[in-house]
Amino acid sequence: MASRRDAAKLAAEIIGAAKARGERTLTEYHSKQVLAAYGVPVTREILVNTVVEAKAAARKLKYPVVLKACSADATHKTEMGLVAVNLASDGALAEALRGMKQRLGTAYAGDFLVQQLIKGDREVVVGMIRDEQFGPSVMFGLGGIFAEVLEDVVFRVAPLRKRDALEMVRGIRGHRLLQAVRGMPAVDLDTLGNAIIALGNIGLDCPDIEQIDVNPMIVSGTSPVAVDALIVLSP
C-alpha cells in the first residue's frame, strides 16, 4: 500500500487522464488501481486484447479465471453479456473472448480483463457518494441477494476512524453473518474496517470523484476482496 499522499497523487493522475479523454467513469481496472493504492484488497488481474495475451495472463494468474470487457463505457457488463466466470482452460477462455468481441463489434476500442476467480459464500458492498451538504458519505452493507432483498446498508460521513468503521459493520441487521457461522470463519474485521475508512479517504482526497461502488467484495476465507468496482467522476 502506498502512503496516502502517494495514493492521492496516483488517483489524481488516473482521474486527470480519464477526464482528458472525456470519460465520466473510470474503467474497472483503473478504479481498482485507485482502491489498491489506498489499501483496499482487490483481485489480481491483467489487461489483454488478444487471445494470445489472454492465455498468457490466465497461466500467470492460474486457472480458473474470469474474463470481462474493460472500458469506461462498459459499466453494466453482466447485463450485456460481457462477463464470463470460471473459465478453466485455454479453449474456454479463447471462446469467451471471441464471443465478447463479436457482441461488442469492431467499434469497441476498449481492453479486456483477465481476473483471478475469487470464491466465497458471503458478499459485502462498500461505496462512497458525495452529498451536496455533508460531503463524502461512506456506505456499507451486505452484498449479493441480501443487498437486493433486505436493503441492509448504513451510511456515515467521512472522515472515519476505525471505531466508526466497526460501528458501521455492527450497525447492519445482518452483521451476524460476518461472524463465525455455519462452519465459516469470522470475517477479518480489521481488513474490512480499513477498506471502509479508505473509501472515505478517497472521497476527501479526490474532489473530482462523485461516487464509488465496490460491489461485490467477496469474503474468501476470512478476507474481503473487491471483485468489481466503479468510480464515477463529477460532471
Image (cartoon, rainbow, N blue to C red):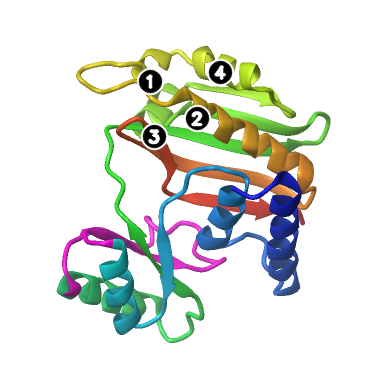
In the picture, the disc for residue 86 is none
Residue pointed to by mark 2: 192
Figure quadrant of residue 147: top left
Left or right, residue 65 beside residue 124: left
Dot placed on the residue nearer the N-terminal end, 3 or 1:
1
Query: Circle 1 — which element?
Result: helix
Residue 222 spot, x, y in % from top left: 35, 30
Q: Is residue 127 magenta?
A: no
Q: Which residues are magenta?
A: 62-90
**Spatial CA span between label 4 and label 3:** 15 Å
Residue 186 spot, x, y in % from top left: 34, 20
Q: Residue at x 50, y 30 (%)?
A: 192
Marks 1 & 2, CB-CB < 8 Å contact: yes
Task: Tell me the amino acid under the disc marked 2.
Answer: Leu
**Spatial CA span between label 1 and label 2:** 10 Å
Dot placed on the residue nearer the N-terminal end, 4 or 3:
4
Residue pointed to by mark 1: 178
Query: Circle 2 — which element?
Result: helix
